[in-house]
Amino acid sequence: MSQLFAGNAPEQAVQAAEPAVTALYAEHALGLTRLAQIMLGDRSAAEDVVQDSFFGLYRRWNSLADPAKAQSYLRSAVLNGCRSALRRASRAQRHAHHDEQFGDSAEVMLLASEDRRAVMTALRGLPHRQREVLVLRYYLDLSDAEISQVMGIKEGSVRSAAHRGLAAIERTLAKEPS
Amino acid sequence: MNRIENLLRDATRDTAARVTSDSIPPLDLTRAHAKLPPPRRRWVLPVLGPVAAIAAVAVIVLAAVAQHPAGQTPALISGGAPPYYISLTADGPPPAHQPFANPPMDITVRSTRTSTVLATVKPPAPYRTFTLVGGTADDTTFLAGAQVQSFMSPMEFYLLRFQAGTRRVTLTPLHVRPSLTTALDTASLSPDGRYLALASDTRLTIQDLRTGTVRSWTSHLQGGYITLDRNDALELSWTAGDRGVSFIWTDDISSLLLLNPASSGDLVKTSKLLVPDLSFTGKGFACSSDPFVAAGGTVVLCGGYTTDKGTGNYPTGQVTTGFGEFSASTGKLLTILDPKKEHLPTTIVEQQFPKPHRARVVDTSKLPYLYWASPDGSILIGERDGKAFIFDDGQEQAIGWSTSIATPAGMNGAAVAW
């Protein structure tokens, strides 16, 4: 058995990736930030997740066999970053004191319809898995098979999470004051 | 497509449209430069083909010395803290035909105190990637799972043994090849090495490595699932004497349960409820990290801070941070290990659920997090105020490695194990 122990790319080679990664950022940062914004509902956190994903690509650039796959890598990295950010947010949620009411946020104010505002509120209240399935399915239009591969769960679990998520949103909307 | 689906499609697109190209900040790669690891040598090992052909008993894999030649292994941690840990480390891009999948993973054996890479191990053929790591009761023995590709391809389990003096790593196949219908989240070897517990979505399986007997439990209660956190190192925990396996079940809330391997029936219904609500709200101490079961299943440990007694509200003024030790039977706080009095910063954030409001939240980046606990709960490895440490014999000792336990994209379980 031959064993090759791959080291990290030399720093100089990684630095040479700067123009390529910067060009990718110019092309894809908007779409990825939009995805992260939907997942997180927090613009600053969304931008951090996207920047961190590009840092990861930059550091790993020299080991990319096919730079054409960079876009797929970035989307996967952003989704993973969102999961981590949501986890940190749920920790913070545990330690939150909720009695300071205020008006709609800027984003909520800008949403065109009350229904859409309520849907986004309900979506962000879902467990992480259900939220991710619904965003991948209804925003990115991924098939259940693709979602299954992205999330590492079986297709039946994708369908189950989507069904439960949709039902939960419907229940939440039904409770909304008209 | 029904109304809810249409609303979701419209609302997500509407939200996305609010992010405009002129508001995207420039990419600041100077931050990435600051995080670059130092260059490492490449090593090519001798061809061991003939040995692999007779590898029914053990596959020997020589380890690469990354930064320190053999014989200069960093000094061991004083006391009983484990001196080494293993970590999944990305090696190259995802497979071309599976752009969403993980890149191939090697395992690196590292010094707990310095994070120095002591050995790097590639998966034995025909496997192409390691996808799972776990600890055992022995400081130099670990559990490793290898697959041809991540996700649902066949998995083989190995015992990974590290010899510090020679930097040699031995992989011994356990001949456990679970039939995966969903991604495997984690595996845990019992302290006596006889039982292997596997967790996957809603299913928990225990295999007797001596007899080959396999038992499985599953539950579909309330849409819940076994919860494994990719940021913390919490995995399945065996209680002393292999009397049970604890796991977290999440539906509306997260609870800690203990499965008796002798039981049968629904996974959740048949398990003992150790901690009904892991938020511990209102009990005078709030957990900021997921819990560990210790002391033979009698106590639960977690990092956190004191709350206003009786209210469970966020702390005002000075609080005590540390590691709460709770009775597993009553949920009551027994003591706070490594206590420190300090003021926790709080910030006001806008939250959207259950309805738009402002909330005052604790800056959780300052809080203590627990990554590993010894079986008796006396030795801890964790993070506090962004710095990693070992708590042993009543003393907190700083250790020099990044506290961000990075988990590769798509992984379900933790990427490190002690």
Image: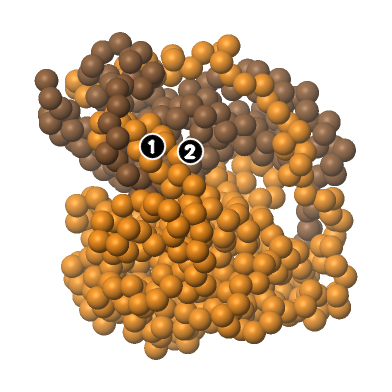
Chain colours: A brown, B orange
Q: Residue at x 38, y 19 (%)?
A: A107
Mark number for residue A82? Answer: 2
Is there one chain holding both mark 1 and mark 2? yes
* Type of the residue with mark 2: Cys
Instruction: List x then y, in percent, for residue A109.
Output: 33, 15
C-alpha distance separating marks 1 and 2: 9 Å
Badges 1 and 2: C-beta atoms under 8 Å apart? yes
Which is in the foreground here, disc 1 or disc 2? 2
Tell me the number on the disc at residue B328.
none
- Whether B161 is drawn above or below B314: the answer is below
Q: Residues within 10 Å of mark 2 (few under 14, many from 20)?
A: many
- Please report the residue visible at 62 percent of the width from the left and 21 percent of the height from the top: B25
Determine crowd level at label 1: few under 14, some 14-19, many 20+ residues with C-alpha closer than 10 A.
many
Q: Which residue is mark 1?
A: A132
Name which quarter of the figure residue A165 lies in: top left
- Chain for mark 2? A
Question: Which kind of residue does numbered mark 1 sit on?
Answer: Glu
Q: Which residue corresponds to the image point at 39% horizontal and 81% vertical from the top-left?
A: B239
- Sequence order check, earlier mark of 1 and 2: 2
Q: Residue at x 82, y 62 (%)?
A: B66
Residue B230: tell me if it is visible: no
Residue B301 horizontal/vertical position (percent): 42, 71
Q: Is residue B239 above or below residue B351?
A: below
- Tell me where residue A113 appears, x and y as whole percent: 26, 13
